[in-house]
Image (cartoon, helix red, strand yellow):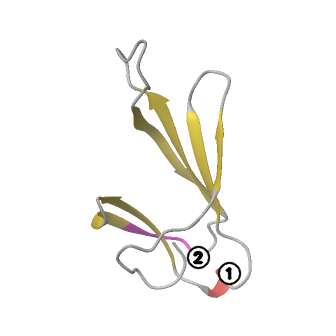
Amino acid sequence: MLGPLQPNAEMRGESFTRKDGTAVNRFPLDEGNAPESEKWMACSYEGRVFQAIKLPITTKECSVVYRPEKGAKGKKANYVVSDITCK
């Protein structure tokens, strides 16, 4: 998120699925007023923040990669976070 840390704040990003089945959410952090704003990566569950990390002001984007949970054959796969990167 951009700006001060706020509960229930969400950014919209780009979402896509790779050929290997992993899903990616990419969030740009370098548009508009972003160079002067605080930048945060906040993880939440059902709207409650349980971990937040302030990012360097120079961060340009963050990506969250999800992989399908093993053992979900024939069902709609549940996804688990496999990687979070910010650069």
Dominant secondary structure (helix, strand or loop) of the stretch shown in magenta: strand
Rendered residue at 29%/67% (across/down): 49
Q: Could you tell which of marks 1 and 2 lies nearer the N-terminus? A: 1
- Badge 1 marks a residue whose secondary structure is helix
Query: On the picture, is 14 further left or further right than 51?
Result: right
The local crowd at label 1, few if under 14, some if 14 to 19, many if 20 or more residues have their Cα within 10 Å, is: some
Which quadrant holds residue 33? bottom right
Q: CA distance from mark 1 to mark 2?
A: 7 Å
Q: Amino acid at mark 1?
A: Pro
Residue linked to disc 2: 57
Q: Are marks 1 and 2 in contact (CB under 8 Å)?
A: yes
Which quadrant holds residue 58? bottom right
Magenta segment includes 67: no
- Badge 2 marks a residue whose secondary structure is loop
Rendered residue at 54%/49% (across/down): 85
The image quadrant where one finds the C terminus is: bottom right
The local crowd at label 2, few if under 14, some if 14 to 19, many if 20 or more residues have their Cα within 10 Å, is: some
Position above or below: 51 against 63: below
Query: On the picture, is 66 further left or further right than 31?
Result: left
Which mark identifies residue 35? 1
Q: Which residues are magenta?
A: 53-57
Query: On the picture, is 29 further left or further right than 45?
Result: right
Query: Where is residue 80 drawn, in percent x and y?
Result: 39, 35
Q: Amino acid at mark 2?
A: Ile
Query: Where is residue 36 drawn, in percent x and y?
Result: 64, 87
Query: Where is residue 71 drawn, in percent x and y?
Result: 34, 14
Rendered residue at 74%/81% (across/down): 32
Query: Where is residue 23 drawn, in percent x and y?
Result: 57, 36
Rendered residue at 55%/77% (across/down): 2
For the residue pair 17 and 42, the one nearer the viewer reads as 17
